Amino acid sequence: METHEGAAAATGGSVLDFSRLSLNTFSAVSVSDERKRDTRQLYLNYNRLASLPSSVSVFCNLELLDISNNGLSSICEGITRLSRLKTLIAKNNRLDEFSLPKHFGSLQLEVLNFSGNRFEEIPLQCTKLLRLQSLSLGGNRLKSIPAEIENLTCLELLYLGGNLITAIPPEVANLPYLSYLVLCDNRIQGVPPELTRLHSLRSLSLHNNLLTYLPREILSLVHLQELSLRGNPLVVRFVKEMTYDPPSLLELAGRTVKSRNIPYYPCDLPSNLLRYLDLASKCPNPKCAGVYFDSCVRQIKFVDFCGKYRLPLMHYLCSPECTSPCSSNPQSDADSEDENSVPVDRLQRVLLG
């Protein structure tokens, strides 16, 4: 080990490389005190370590630790003493949600890679890493994304591809700096319309899921440059009618007030009815002046992107009798008007095949 340390020193005093040495254990006894203080990057990847030894805590100024491709099933409490650690790469091990120390969330990590492990849940300790900019948990056994993911407000990249996730929680939309969202190779059946709040999103990978349509609100992702959809059972024909619950008497009255512009004032109605009337949604059909509240008809609209791809987007009409802009005639006036309203440079790449 001393010989290896000398080789590492030759490449730079801030780097210690103990990778690919078939180590079963790791000891820092042979490392000088000066070297321990100077080391900023420690590489222990491609060894045979079953657990991360507490001796790593002696590298008090460590900024990067790579422990990938070992047999790790636990990470020692000593790692929490690495107050300057910014990057932890621990992919391709045997870690799960019980492998992390209790105070793991106290670290000042900016990059965390737990891909290729055995996590069935995202550990809550990870959602306490408030400086985290990149989180990778691809190739695990995750079934869901916790609502606490919204705590990671500095996150720019979230990689959760290759899991068993069935739904995207709306809390993901509360990540203001998220630029890259990778959810490919999961079991996701729908995209929440709340994702329209991801104003920084540039790349959205959803290929190889169970998607049959996209929410209409996805058009609001003005910075989106890449949308990957291949391998999804996207609808291949226009859907004319879907489930429709007849409107209540309350909704019929509200529709009448709104569509006929009947004037009313706060002193005329109880506060609960005033709030209800404020919830009216305008029918997206440009030929219809109607509104709806709770009862609507879900329909699929194919929208042209970049003059090449037609994406199925979900939208809502006020009633089955409404003249649908989703006409089976692709050259209908309503269809053309809606498509032409989409900027041609809105998406740079739409990957369907």
Image: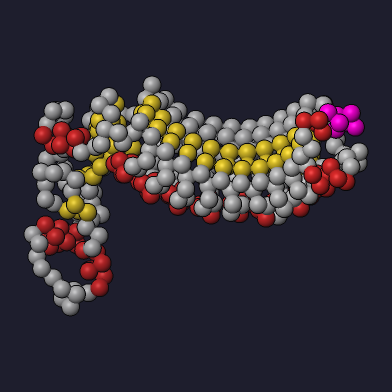
Residue 260 placement, left or right of 244: left
Residue that extends furthest to the top in the rendered view of this protein: 353
Residue that extends furthest to the bottom in the rendered view of this protein: 267
Residue 44 picture location, percent across and down? 77, 34
Residue 187 seen anywhere in this rendered image of the structure: no
Residue 195 picture location, percent across and down? 39, 46
Residue 317 or 310: which is nearer the viewer?
310
Magenta stretch: dominant SS? helix
Residue 66 seen anywhere in this rendered image of the structure: yes
Q: Which residues lie in the magenta part?
A: 1-7
> In which quadrant will I find the N terminus?
top right
Residue 134 or 127: which is nearer the viewer?
134
> In which quadrant will I find the C terminus?
top left
Residue ID at (25%, 42%): 315
Residue ID at (67%, 55%): 106
Please say whether residue 92 is one of the residues in the magenta stretch.
Answer: no
Up-down relation of residue 268 to residue 63 (above or below): below
Residue ID at (13%, 28%): 331
Which quadrant of the figure has residue 225?
A: top left
How many marks the image carries: the answer is 0
| Colouring scheme, one of rainbow, by chain, secondary structure, one colour | secondary structure
Residue 290 placement, left or right of 67: left
Residue 168 or 311: which is nearer the viewer?
311
Residue 336 picture location, percent across and down? 15, 33
Which quadrant of the figure has residue 339?
A: top left
Residue ID at (51%, 44%): 156
Residue 231 placement, left or right of 147: left
Residue 134 or 328: which is nearer the viewer?
134
Residue 3 picture location, percent across and down? 89, 28
